[in-house]
Image: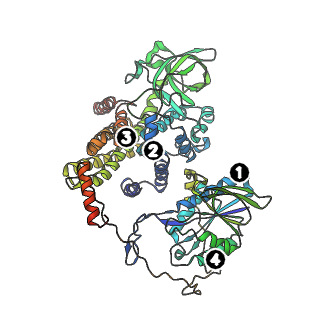
Amino acid sequence: MRAWKRRREREKLDHRLSEDEITLRELAARVAREKIAPVAAELDEREEFPRRILEEIGRAGLMGLTVPERYGGMGLGHLATCLVIEELSRACAGVGVTYAASILGYGPILLFGTEEHKGTYLPSMCTGEGLGAFALTEPQAGSDAAAIRCTAVPRDGGYVISGTKQWITNGGEASLYTIIALTAPQRGPRGASALIVPAGTPGLSYGRKEKKLGIRCSATRELVFDECFVPAANLLGREGQGFIIAMRNLNLGRPGVAAQALGIAQAALDHSVRYSLEREQFGQPIGRFQAVGHMLADMATHIEAARSLVYAVARAIDSGDQDFEREAAMAKTFASDTAMAAATDAVQIFGGYGYMRDYPVEKLFRDAKITQIYEGTNQVQRNIIAASLLKEAARR
Amino acid sequence: MRIVVLVKQVPDAPEPRLAGGRPALDGVPWVTNPFDLHGLEEALRIKEQLGDIVETMALTAGGARAAETLREALAVGIDRVLRIDAPELQGLETGLVTVARVLAAAIRRLGGADLLFCGQKSLDQQSGMLPPALAEAIGACFIPDAAKITVDPSLGRVAVERLLPTGRAQLRACLPAVITLAKTINEPRLASLRGLMKAKRAEIPCVTPDELGVPLPGASGPGDGYALLGFRSPPSRPAAMKLEGTPAEQARALVHQLRQGRLL
């Protein structure tokens, strides 16, 4: 418990968090420590969805942080969201992604929804009773999101949705889905639109819960749309705006994935430091060996650098900066690569014990990998960064 | 109906060291006594059940830092708080009977109480003696180790299930009553973000023992026959020994050690 506190005190100096932001993070840390950490290994082992934990997070008032107060939220920004995701992920990245995916689910409503959409769908997202999910990926459209085939044909004052969405986080558990489907397939990506599909809509069914390497308590399922009708009022923005909405939503969500990775990396460091002091070999704690000490030093250095980048991007977004795509991609890439490296080194420091399920770093190792893959692989992120650099240089 | 919850801020030092004859508490975090959180939770549950006829209050004694514990109480939803500005009531400097008298005076200042909830004990002293002393000081019933509390405000009484080593006893008490709560009675809630933000900006009222008309023993008040003379650490335990080798070698080494210690 004291290690958590010490780190917070140091960060107060390093990252200039306000008193309110520190209060927020302490609350998230307490939820993580008291409600998540004691059950994280069990939920992972049983691949059990963390429904009760979500209720606790909701009761703590941490759901719907970025939702305006008039819809029941806290009216806070992306830095606040990142602080919470980081702390939750420190205890369990599966809970962290479940929380973050809900924000990604209602994000398009916040960005492009009408007053009616917001009044109808956002309040339940803030209490923990409701849960959001965002559905873009399809079996043949992963990194190449423009290759989606799911259609939403305009008919009888609404849209008839047909097709399949794959690997949808919170699939089958969410109360609200925002999906991207082609309302005008002949126009290709320009014919895509964003639609709200509440759970229970006839024609929407779910595939089996996917068996994953990590983040195993989170639910990842296929969404199957079989002539699923939603009224025209469920369209977000305008027809054809689907990809603009999706990309804005994903860009805003990227610091969240980075924060999740930060939480995993920090947990890897916390466990490694403690173990390096406790574990003795050749008559001394293994942390005294330079080989181990340097691993700890590199972990801590990369984590602090990643944290600075993630918080800086979140602050830029909160201050109204619209041109943050490159930096958001950098934050996601750097933080997730840091998490993977830190978790790998943590397993190495724990040695044979690190490979065993009885010790916590094996889970961190499994959980870290996905942060390099989802919400845009790190390869796609590097494409974004490179394209942005070249575009900027060409303009000069 | 008024429920007063006694809360105490305690040092979170599982193995305190002595420095200069006193517990070394520098750098030790101070937390709300975890046993007291059950009192706050139970008061909130009774209020949720009975509505606005119930007023919940939290009372603590301590220095300025103890206000944080009252902010925690406000953050979870307690209506009003009061701090008795007297750090000497937190430690062992003051006898429990005196502490109880000061608390009783503060409760009278608050307008009295129908129910007083206390944790089973405090993390630092663990005597569990303050609640009965307080019951005596205010002339209330005392029931320890409550595992279930049912209030009937119209009848002015409370039904309590008390934990016993062999089972549970069903008890009924008239109000006012001082009740200590078993840890199993409830699971304390966490404060909400909104509650924390509100509590952070709240004024924490405070009163001194002198203002309550109960001056503390010592310079300004009469003695109470109690004095703290000093602290002593328990003798340190010898380091543990791990026996290596095959089971037969370990057994031989164990017998050798036991013989050396004249235990065999």
User: Front-most of B21 and A103?
Assistant: B21
Q: Quadrant of residue B257?
A: bottom left
- Residue at which label 3 appears: A261
Q: Would residue B126 appear left or right of A280 to someone viewing this image?
A: right
From what the image shows, is residue A109 above or below residue A10? above
Mark 3 or 1, closer to the camera: 1
Q: Quadrant of residue B134?
A: bottom right
What colour scheme governs how the chains and residues are painted in the rendered image of this protein? rainbow
User: Front-most of A248 and A175?
Assistant: A175
- Residue at which label 1 appears: B49
Mark 2 or 4, closer to the camera: 4
- Residue at which label 2 appears: A88
- Tell me the crowding category of disc 2: few under 14, some 14 to 19, or many 20 or more residues within 10 angstroms, Cα based: many
Q: In terms of secondary structure, where does tag 4 sit? A: helix
Q: Given the image, what chain letter belongs to the residue carrying mark 3? A: A
Determine the CA span between mark 3 and mark 1: 43 Å
Provide residue B159's location: percent of width, then percent of height: 72, 57
Q: In terms of secondary structure, where does tag 3 sit? A: helix
Determine the CA span between mark 3 and mark 4: 54 Å
Q: Are marks 2 and 3 on the same chain?
A: yes
